[in-house]
Amino acid sequence: MNRLLYTLLLHLALPLIALRLALRARKAPAYAQRIDERFSLNLPSMKPGGIWVHAVSVGESIAAAPMIRALQARYPELPITVTCMTPTGSERIQALFGGSVQHCYLPYDLPWAAARFLDRVKPRLAVVMETELWPNHIHQCAKRGIPVALANARLSERSARGYARFGKLTAPMLAELSLIAVQTQTEAERFLDLGARFECVEVTGSIKFDLKIDAELLQRADALRQQWQATTRPIWIAASTHTGEDEIILAAHHQLLKSRPDALLILVPRHPERFNTVHELCISQGLTTRRRSTGEAVQTSDQVLLGDTMGELLFLYALADIAFVGGSLVANGGHNLLEPAALGKPVLSGPHLFNFLEIAAQLREAGALNEVENAGQLADKVAALLNEPSEMQRMSQAGLSVLKANQGALQRLLEGLQRLL
């Protein structure tokens, strides 16, 4: 399938795209807003000539933050435009950077929409986070002589097979990229097999290892636990959970409460449109539940704190003694294991970690990650760790050592971007 056929099919799919937006808007009303931006209409005023960074949603926005801040410090004269595709990603970008960056939704990958966007922004450099590849946007950049870098790039075996099925579209698109900064050598070989130019592929590592924890965050977490009178209370967190996981998590918590009746679970669904549903699930299971969004202090009788706020995940991790990272008990591929590790928390996950195979392997080998397959195993592991402070401390130090050993990817990425500028 070449780009012309792809573009035709994308135009024909516009009614389905509109229907999908409408369905999403029923659960998350923000999807019904700023639709014109998705077609390069009524874009906010933009100062041209800077750096354009695309981060599809929340996770990529958070991962891109250190890079964007470093670019702001290195090139204060260049405006930085940050785009995304989701309302939650937009909220995160605005919370992280406020008015210090230009922001809008990335228009759909239609040639005329991409051209109108680029004619407005006129970037000197485009940086796409991870593997958000849009053939028409990349081609329109190439036509204008705008170098495109794929930053913190990752490509699972499954994704590589998917791209390979459309080789006549994938290979020309990858050949138009100026830099592919990949996380691992294995992923570099996958990009090369798909048609990327050898001289443009560099193994820089994952910038997620370069996560810096603000000491003030830890102080705030300690202060809040004191306010809750919960400094010695066992607290564990299940973060970034998906549909089908919450029931498993709550079953594990029910089991844990039998041996540790004072245990508190912080439950953080991945998507805000599920906050109310998960709250109802907690109540239906007879668990005394408090919503973080109310700002109320946790009481000793509370069994679950629902993390239904945006932008607080690191803080909620800091409040806990043990962290379970979701998207891994269901076949979603997992989420960022390094955030709790950077906070010195013992890390637990399910078996489905195909989005983070290399990171998971390093944490597992160091003894910083334990994987469970069901509610019983999860409850047993949390209980065992709570009963063994020395093992919790060992896992904590092992995770911090893995991060320290892998840092430097951000510097290597910035050097590559500097060459393109």
Image (cartoon, rainbow, N blue to C red):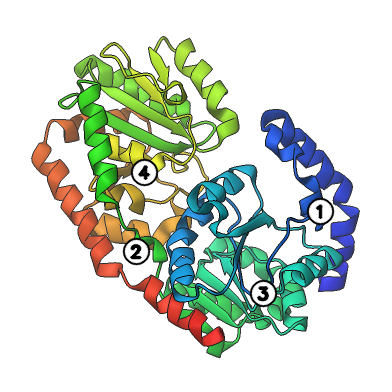
Given the image, on which type of amino acid does mark 1 rest?
Asn
Asked if labels 3 and 2 touch by Cβ distance under 8 angstroms, the answer is no
User: Percent x, y for residue 259?
Assistant: 20, 18
Asked if labels 2 and 4 touch by Cβ distance under 8 angstroms, the answer is no
Q: What residue is pinned by disc 3?
A: 123
Q: CA distance from mark 2 to mark 1?
A: 37 Å
Between label 1 and label 4, give the one nearer the viewer.
Answer: 1
Given the image, on which type of amino acid does mark 3 rest?
Pro
Q: CA distance from mark 4 to mark 2?
A: 15 Å
Local SS, label 2:
helix
Kindly indicate the quadrant of the structure image that contains residue 306.
Answer: top left
Tell me which numbered mark, 2 or 1, is placed earlier along the sequence. 1
Q: Quadrant of the C terminus?
A: bottom right
Q: Closer to the camera, 18 or 190?
A: 18
User: Percent x, y for residue 114?
Assistant: 78, 66
Tell me which numbered mark, 2 or 3, is placed earlier along the sequence. 3
Q: What residue is pinned by disc 1?
A: 42
Residue found 38% across the figure and 33% down from its top? 374
Q: CA distance from mark 3 to mark 1?
A: 19 Å
Given the image, on which type of amino acid does mark 2 rest?
Asp
Asked if labels 1 and 3 touch by Cβ distance under 8 angstroms, the answer is no
Q: Quick check: 43 left or right of 416? A: right
Q: What residue is pinned by disc 4?
A: 314
